[in-house]
Image (spheres, rainbow, N blue to C red):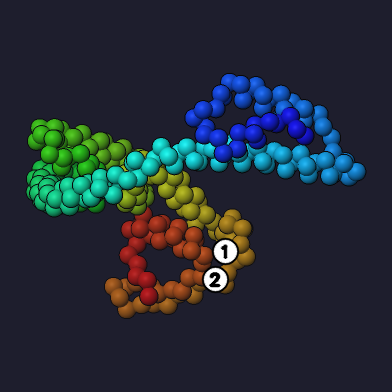
Amino acid sequence: MNDLQIVRLENTDISVWDFSMLRAELQRGLDSYAGLVYTDETIKDAKNDRSTLNKVKKVIEDARKAYKARCLAPYDALEPQIKELVNMVEKQRVLIDETVKDFETRQKEEKELEVRKYYDRKAVVLGSLADALYPKLFDKKWVNASNARAKYEEGIMVAINGAAADIAAIRGMNSPFVNTLLEVYAQTLSMDQVKVKQAELEDAAKKASLTTVEEAAAAVGATAPTPVQTTPANTEGGTAMRIYATQNQMNQITDFMKAIGVRYELI
């Protein structure tokens, strides 16, 4: 294939190439390959054509790389000196930056103490959940230097009032599992998670109300375990028992015991 005459430009400075002419010339040469089908018998032609295209590509790439190197030569000569100047500045900048960051950290720590004191005064409405809810309600913006006292106090009150409304809603559910539901809320700050837990506990309570071990096993899709044997315990008139259950079943059992006020101890 001799139509790709761009190879004649080998070792010619790319800056003097007539790209419009070369583009048209190259396209004419490439068009001659359109529709070509190579067979086992013409594989030699395929190899020759591939060699031609490789040569054309190499001529273009070599010219590009040579031109790029020539253009970058002045920059490459200056780069080490430029970097030296930048490093001199950076060394001092880092020292000052560390001082500034230390100051900003101490400012935030002091401001967070103010935030916590204000929260503690106003979070009485959250009752025993106030401490557990603080990390969930805390907003990093409250301790920003640009956040004025009135602004962060407003944010704290919005957060407290929102949590108080959720807690009131949970208590308003009149669920026998209210204590467990409040724990879930304190851990997740999510009413959706509370509703999921309520449904799980109600389901567990229904299963617990079944009259026989066989019925309970059928409800959870498992083989009935050996009936639980209980023995009197000497601690506050309690009863000791051994329970055979999956982890999921144990979670449901402990949730249910919490909900109905049973005091238990894992041994």
Residue in view at x 10 percent, y 34 percent: 148
Which part of the image, by quadrant, shows the C terminus? Answer: bottom left
The correct choice, above or below, for 139 with respect to 229 in the image is: above
13 or 99, which is in the foreground?
Answer: 13
The correct choice, above or below, for 74 with respect to 243 in the image is: above
Residue in view at x 22 percent, y 41 percent: 139
Q: Secondary structure at mark 2?
A: loop
Task: Indicate the position of residue 65 as horizontal and vertical percent values.
Answer: 50, 41
Q: Which mark is residue 54?
A: none
Which part of the image, by quadrant, shows the N terminus? Answer: top right
62 or 144, which is in the foreground?
Answer: 62
Q: Quadrant of residue 154?
A: top left
Residue in view at x 62 percent, y 65 percent: 223
Residue marked by disc 2: 227
Residue in view at x 52 percent, y 54 percent: 207
The correct choice, above or below, for 223 with respect to 172 in the image is: below
Is 215 displayed left or right of 78 in the figure?
A: right
The correct choice, above or below, for 171 with respect to 109 in the image is: above
Q: Which mark is residue 213?
A: 1
Q: Is residue 20 visible?
A: yes
Task: Indicate the position of residue 93 as horizontal and vertical percent values.
Answer: 16, 48
Q: Residues within 10 Å of mark 1 (few under 14, many from 20)?
A: some
45 or 211, which is in the foreground?
Answer: 45
Circles 2 and 1 in contact, beta carbons < 8 Å: yes
247 or 1, which is in the foreground?
Answer: 1
Task: Indicate the position of residue 210 as horizontal and vertical percent values.
Answer: 54, 56
Q: Quadrant of residue 48?
A: top right
Residue type highlighted by circle 2: Pro
Task: Indicate the position of residue 82 as horizontal and vertical percent values.
Answer: 25, 45
Q: Is residue 136 visible?
A: no
Q: Secondary structure at mark 1?
A: helix
